[in-house]
Amino acid sequence: MRIRNLIDVIPPKERAILVAAPRKGSPDAAKIDEHLEELARLVDTAGAEVVGTLRQQVATSSAATLIGEGKVEELAKLVFETKATLVVFDEELSPAQGQGLEQGINTRVMDRAEIILDIFATRARTHEAKLQVELAQLRYMLPRLTRMWTHLSRVRGGIGMRGPGETQLETDRRMIRTKIAMLADKLADVERHRRTIRAGRSPMLTAALVGYTNAGKSSILRALAGDHDVFVEDRLFATLDTLIREVDLGENLKVRVSDTVGFIRKLPHHLVASFRATLEEAGESDLLLHVTDASHPEWEDQMATVDEVLDDLGLSDHPTLIVFNKLDALEDPTGFAESAHARWPDAIFTSAMRIDGLAPLKAALRGKAEAIRPVVRVLLNPADGKRLGALHRSGDVLGQALEDGMLAVTVRLEPWRAEQLRREGVTVL
């Protein structure tokens, strides 16, 4: 049998032009190159090839096209010269602006939010993640149905046309609203199930990894847990689903660590709303581990972005430990640590690529675990097997011995459990 030519099997990559049009004098305008570089990484993650860029600082954004008429003509010329099949704006476009631009350049137009939604659609693996992505896509699509129908009439696939949203393009607003309500109900059921699971877990310190996408959260979880099944990839949004692993800290101490979806600048609010149930895992934790890529030139801006999302989720006052990761990629890690310590005295510095690179983080987690479960001595009647069994189930028994006719149990125990035993007449030292 003749093997088919790969050119006939593998569809060609979409050719994308990136456009940045921040408001003149804004913070975004001062970092236009860095933002275009990040957008290029998003487009690459989505599976397209960048063939050109266009920049304009707008004094007043056009309601019809965002950029001025002259720039629209320049963009149309660039599309023709590069044979681009897609134009991606770093700014969020209104439905009218998206439609106006497509009519002006006769090429499909997407904004940053659409690219991120498309990446999520291709990377969702679990049932919950797929529900969340579909809900976010429908919420984004609802006010843009006219432009979406234009896409459908061209009978084109590719970036932005994949995932659950593709099957909804021919529906009307009423059907989409019904679907949104149904998905929201399903996610509410998933969250109730998640709460039931949380209630049934054995008590121990819980920590949630949060941070900018590609900061190294999954690498940290993989190294802490020694679990090579934890997926790690040097790409934006490599993992979407919340992973939870129990980590042995030594000295009879454990911590339950969860890895959450990464954040990014201009994260679509539809996505934040849809993933709120998953991110509540972070809210239920005892401690947030804010992971920052210390080697990234924009690490301070990335930290600020994560803080904004945490504030939006109502987690700005949650106990948080700053973790500067990827110290191995720095030319002067000692100098960086000294400078960062001056601003964040409790910060931890790690490298998941070194054998002992997570030792400081483990030590900090061990201290937190000891604080919430101090070691106490409980004196029991040797015949009180019921309470002894309860101590083994709810605490971490370190040892037991007979003393003056009483069974002395040395155990790590939450303060509220120790107080409950005292109210029951048990001696707790």
Image (cartoon, rainbow, N blue to C red):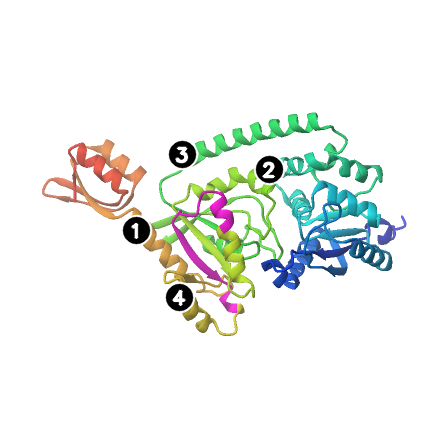
Task: Identify the amino acid type marked 2.
Answer: Gln
Which residue lies under the disc numbered 4? 341
Measured along the vertical axis of the image, is residue 399 above or below residue 38?
above
In the foreground, 254 or 155: 155
Q: According to the image, label 2 marks what residue?
A: 132
In whole angstroms, how far apart are the C-alphas of marks 3 and 1? 21 Å
The location of residue 354, given as percent across then percent down, is 49, 65
Mark 4 residue type: His
Q: Are marks 3 and 2 in contact (CB under 8 Å)?
A: no
Residue 360 is inside the magenta segment: no
How many angstroms separate mark 3 from mark 2 (CA)?
23 Å
Q: Is residue 126 above or below residue 222?
A: above
* C-alpha separation, residue under disc 2 versus residue under disc 4: 38 Å
Percent x, y for residue 124? 63, 42
Location of mark 1 (residue): 370
Q: Which comes sooner in the sequence, label 3 or label 2?
A: 2
Q: Which residue is mark 3?
A: 199
The numbered disc on residue 414 is none
Q: Secondary structure at mark 1?
A: helix
Q: Nearer the viewer, mark 1 or mark 4?
A: 4
Of label 2 and label 4, which has the lower sequence position? 2
Q: Residue furthest left?
A: 404
x 85%, y 40%: residue: 154
Horizontally, residue 227 falls left or right of residue 317, namely right
Q: Residue furthest front?
A: 60
Of labels 4 and 3, the one closer to you = 4
Dot 3: few (<14), some (14–19), or many (≥20) neighbours within 10 Å? few
In the image, what residue type sits under mark 1?
Answer: Glu
Q: Nearer the viewer, mark 2 or mark 1?
A: 2
Q: Secondary structure at mark 2?
A: helix
